[in-house]
Image (cartoon, rainbow, N blue to C red):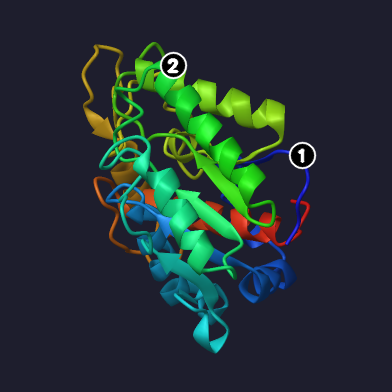
Amino acid sequence: MTSGTRAILVDHTTTALAQIPAQWVERARATLHIAYGHTSHGSQLTTGMTGLAAFKGPAYAWRAGGAGGALDLRDTPFSGASDLGNPDRAAWAAATRTYLAAQPAVNVVIWSWCGQVSSATPADIDAYLSAMSALEQEFPNVRFVYMTGHLDGTGLAGNLHLRNEQIRQHCQSRGKVLYDFADIETYDPDGVYYGDRIPNDACDYDSNGDGRRDRNWAVDWQGRHTVGVDWFQCPAAHSQPVNANMKAYAAWWLFARLAGWEG
């Protein structure tokens, strides 16, 4: 697994699964041992990944422990915290320390938010960033993946966007690893941007500028493309399948980068 100070930024520009060389997918399966803490929104990654393995085959298989050559991804293995804000904004860090002390093989830790970035203050996000940095110092052989909060329909002037920008700027300037959850759901698979149309996590957006969300870009995109060819069915908590498709593609891009692929 690679280390270093260059930022790894995973977002809507890193959802092209076909661009990931097969050797780095294999390398990720062989070398990464991932612990992932999340609640419902974060499950979009894992349900998308399960659907992807059915869609594209065992090269993308995952399971806790990695039996049979699958990626070793331990889904919600932590005790004492459910996500980055549940039961509070600090429990996840203590849960991470306890887990890593008992699981020395784990070399990647990912935590996702539920809706807590929407109500976060700048100080709340600073506390999150400081806690992540402390864990990086304590566990230098583990890569910690930062994450933004999901879209909430408040637009570019909303608190969510401002706090996500705070996270992005920290990761870009300090060479961190960021899975940009919100950015991925701001674009459709063709790269069409919806961020200036008050989109929410369900992929609803304002199509005509009247301040009301009246269309759903994911439903529209799925309707124009062939299921089983261009996209695959899978559960997507709070959202639509193609959103979870893209979250899964981006997850494998992340894993290949962590395994050493230059991207």
**Residue at image point 28% right, 60% down:** 235
The picture quadrant where one finds residue 261 is bottom right
Q: Position of residue 134 (x, y in %)?
A: 58, 38
In this rendering, would 171 be left or right of 159?
right
Question: Residue type at mark 1?
Answer: Arg
Q: Is residue 120 visible?
A: yes
Q: Position of residue 58 (x, y in %)?
A: 52, 81
**Residue at image point 31% right, 23% down:** 207
SS type, badge 1? loop
**Residue at image point 61% right, 55% down:** 253
Question: Residue type at mark 2?
Answer: Pro
Which label was assigned to residue 182? none
Question: In terms of depth relative to the viewer, which is nearer, 210 or 30?
Answer: 30
Query: From mark 2 to mark 1, how far is it between C-alphas?
Result: 25 Å
Task: Name the residue beneath numbered marker 2.
Answer: 122
Q: Residues within 10 Å of mark 2 (few under 14, many from 20)?
A: some
Q: Position of residue 95 (x, y in %)?
A: 40, 52
Which quadrant is home to the N terminus? bottom right
Question: In terms of depth relative to the viewer, which is nearer, 239 or 34?
Answer: 34
Q: Position of residue 251 (x, y in %)?
A: 53, 55
The picture quadrant where one finds residue 211 is top left
In this rendering, would 105 be left or right of 149?
right
Question: In terms of depth relative to the viewer, which is nearer, 141 or 202?
Answer: 141
Q: Does 206 sit above or below residue 78?
A: above
Task: Name the outermost residue toward the bottom.
Answer: 68
Task: Name the residue beneath numbered marker 1.
Answer: 6
Q: Does 113 sit above or below residue 169?
A: below
SS type, badge 2? helix
Q: Pointers 2 and 1 in contact (CB under 8 A)?
A: no
Q: Residues within 10 Å of mark 1 (few under 14, many from 20)?
A: few
Q: Is residue 230 visible?
A: no
